[in-house]
Amino acid sequence: MFDRQVFFRLLPHRHSILSGTIGLAVACGAMLGTSSNLIAENWTSLVGNRTVQAQMVGLWDNNVILLMSNGKRVSVPMKSLIAESRIQAEQIAARLKEQRESLSEELRQVADAESAAAPDPLPTPPAPPAYQPLAPNLSINEAIEQIQTQIREGHLAVAVDALPPSFRSELDQLVDLAMQKIDANEWNQGNERFYRLVDLIVTRQNWILSHPSLSSGDPDSPGAFSEAFNDLILPTANALRAALADDAMTPDNIRRKGFTNWVRDRSQAMAPYVHQLTQTFTSSEPQWEVANFKGDTATIQRASSGSQQPGQRRSNRGPTHEMVRVEGYWIPKVFADDFPTWVEEQTKKLEAMTDGQTSMTALAQESSNMNSMAASTIQQSAQMFETFLQPIESAADATAFHEATEPMIAAVQPMISMFSAMAKMGGGRNQNGMSGYGNSGYGMGEPGYDDMNMGMEMEPGYGEPMMEDGSMDQSGSGYGLEPMSPMNQ
């Protein structure tokens, strides 16, 4: 049976589907009517006085259509053939009918694939390497390396597993309290609406790419938007769709599992798609390196890019971060200092709210000091979003979908243009495995505009502190640092 998914993989540009359809039609004609694909049979008259070799190409109105060796076609009534020839004609006719039906089904499936909203089944990226939670009491080098590795492999659970156990416990309690206070109906409706949006992106991906306002118009060139869609938008939508699937975001589900366990569960569901993103937009090289450390404190900074030539001045790599080890886990010092106070403040705010009746807007206002104008804008946006969403979901074909999405496309056209411009300049996809978005984007790539030295060279030693005890730098070659001593400063 014809495999549409294989067909899409072999023919990545959809103009090729038309070529495939034509090719199958030609093949159908060749199998049914070309002498090179048919075998000549012996046909004997009823009285047995004449036998000819010819190829049967069909049975029409009880007449056998034979292709003679000279290329001519003749019609022979079944009643004028001996019994063996009549049986032979019926068998060949049945075989030809089966071939026609099989080819017709393949052509129908090709046509369905051409008009389908998305490939069926939806393609899934390969599974990433298995998640490896951080062990306690790692060195700062080991901790940084493992965190970066797990992020590159698509495992967002490392964000909670890199925290000290007491911090995780306090987060579990705080989120549990928030889920206790939240208006579950409003929360679930908001998540359900968001799921519908990302589900539309995934399940209508063919129609999105064929939208006249988005497609390049050149079947041989996918266009900047197509690249941005396939590399960034679609994997992101797939990841969010996996995160929101099966009512995973309901307050009851989060409270039952506990926040950190819930994060691990959702991270596993999202990992293939997050891994797909990180392989496109992040580097395989270390992004952070140890500048110095002593005991349970350390300083990390952006890793240097490329090799340094002898005598070459080191470039400014941007800000450094002070790290401390708490309960065997390395975390930013400012986070370690501020976290207890933040948890205490948020807990007091939540305890003052009414169980099961706190709106999402009120929760956001209390937790982030959002002003009333911003809260009103969010509410109005949710109502407008529902107005846009319903006609798009009900579109039964590509034409209706394009018409229904036109208002939304017009509203987000500036963002689409930005994606397209970035793709044309190579800003998003990194052919060398390095992110073009810089630190201010995903935080996992090469320096962005804020981190660049802007052509100003720094004197040797700036931003390259020695160990606090005056010893050589012990960060190791794995982080790209060269050994330093007072002699080479």
Image (cartoon, rainbow, N blue to C red):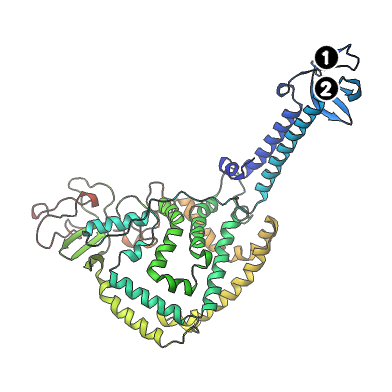
- Side of 278 relative to 227 (left or right): left
> Where does label 1 land, which residue?
52
Q: Quadrant of the N terminus?
A: top right
What amino acid is labelled 2 in the image?
A: Leu
Q: What secondary structure is marked by label 2? A: strand
Percent across and percent down for residue 180 are 45, 80
Q: At 32% across and 73% down in the image, what residue appears?
A: 169
Q: Quadrant of the C terminus?
A: bottom left
Depth check, front residue: 252 or 160? 252
- Distance between the Cα atoms at labels 2 and 1? 10 Å
Percent across and percent down for residue 25 are 72, 35
Percent across and percent down for residue 274 are 43, 56
Percent across and percent down for residue 105 are 71, 41
Q: What secondary structure is marked by label 1? A: strand
**Quarter of the figure with residue 485:** bottom left
Tell me if residue 113 comes above or below residue 381 in the rendering: above
Q: Earlier in the sequence, mark 2 or mark 1?
A: 1
Depth check, front residue: 378 or 330? 330
Q: At 54% across and 78% down in the image, what residue appears?
A: 186
- Side of 207 relative to 81 (left or right): left
Q: At 64% across and 66% down in the image, what residue appears?
A: 407
> Where does label 2 land, which residue?
66
Depth check, front residue: 180 or 235? 180
Q: Are marks 2 and 1 in contact (CB under 8 Å)?
A: yes
Q: At 64% across and 62% down in the image, what residue appears?
A: 406
What amino acid is labelled 1 in the image?
A: Val
- Side of 400 relative to 153 (left or right): right
Judged by depth in the image, the label closer to the viewer, 2 or 1, is 1
